[in-house]
Image (cartoon, rainbow, N blue to C red):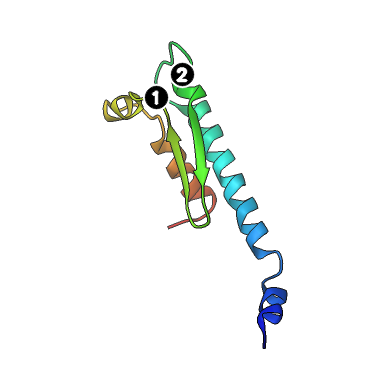
């Protein structure tokens, strides 16, 4: 078996995984923006929620420096989105 045989077996699996990550990221960001339990006076928290992905990881984050403080005060900025994606995609 040479590398071409391995590549033939793998096929488009990496593209499928990337597509799944993008769908999960879009779902998480959508959930966070729609269900954030805080009053977003300026629109910055909702607008600055996004995801980043690499080969093996997907991370939902918010660029506003105070997002973690809002979350720490008991409001849902990102944590609900994580729970939502874990439940929807049956992740551990």
Q: Is residue 81 above or below residue 64?
A: below
Q: Which residue is most to the top?
A: 41
Q: Is residue 30 above or below residue 6?
A: above
Q: Is residue 37 above or below residue 85?
A: above
- Which quadrant would the C terminus be assigned to in this image? bottom left
On screen, residue 66 versus residue 83, left or right, reads left
Q: Which residue is most to the bottom?
A: 1
Q: Position of residue 52 (x, y in %)?
A: 50, 42
Q: Name which residue lies at 67% across and 72% down.
A: 10
- Which of the 4 image quadrants contains residue 83? top left
Image marks 1 and 2: residues in contact by CB distance under 8 Å = yes
Which disc number belongs to residue 12?
Answer: none
CA gap between label 1 and label 2 equals 7 Å
On screen, residue 91 versus residue 9, left or right, reads left
Q: Position of residue 64 (x, y in %)?
A: 39, 24
As helix, strand or loop, the secondary structure at mark 1 comes to loop
Q: Residues within 10 Å of mark 2 (few under 14, many from 20)?
A: few
Task: Compare residues 64 and 81 and report the one nearer the observer.
Answer: 64
- Which of the 4 image quadrants contains residue 16? bottom right
Looking at the image, tell me whether mark 1 or mark 2 is earlier in sequence order.
Answer: 2
Q: Which residue is mark 1?
A: 64
Q: Which residue is mark 2?
A: 44
Q: Position of residue 45 (x, y in %)?
A: 44, 22
Q: Is residue 42 above or below residue 60?
A: above
Q: Name which residue lies at 38% across and 30% down.
A: 76
Q: Name which residue lies at 46% across and 40% down.
A: 60
Q: Name which residue lies at 39% across and 20% down.
A: 38
As helix, strand or loop, the secondary structure at mark 2 comes to helix
């Amino acid at each position: 078996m040479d590398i071409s045989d391995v590549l033939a077996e793998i096929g488009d699996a990496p593209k499928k995984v990337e597509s799944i990550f993008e769908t999960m990221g879009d779902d998480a960001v959508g959930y966070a923006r729609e269900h954030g339990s805080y009053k977003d006076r300026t629109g910055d928290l909702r607008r600055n929620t996004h995801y980043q992905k690499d080969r093996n990881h997907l991370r939902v984050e918010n660029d506003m420096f105070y997002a973690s403080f809002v979350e720490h005060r008991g409001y849902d900025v990102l944590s609900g989105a994580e729970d939502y994606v874990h439940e929807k995609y049956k992740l551990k």
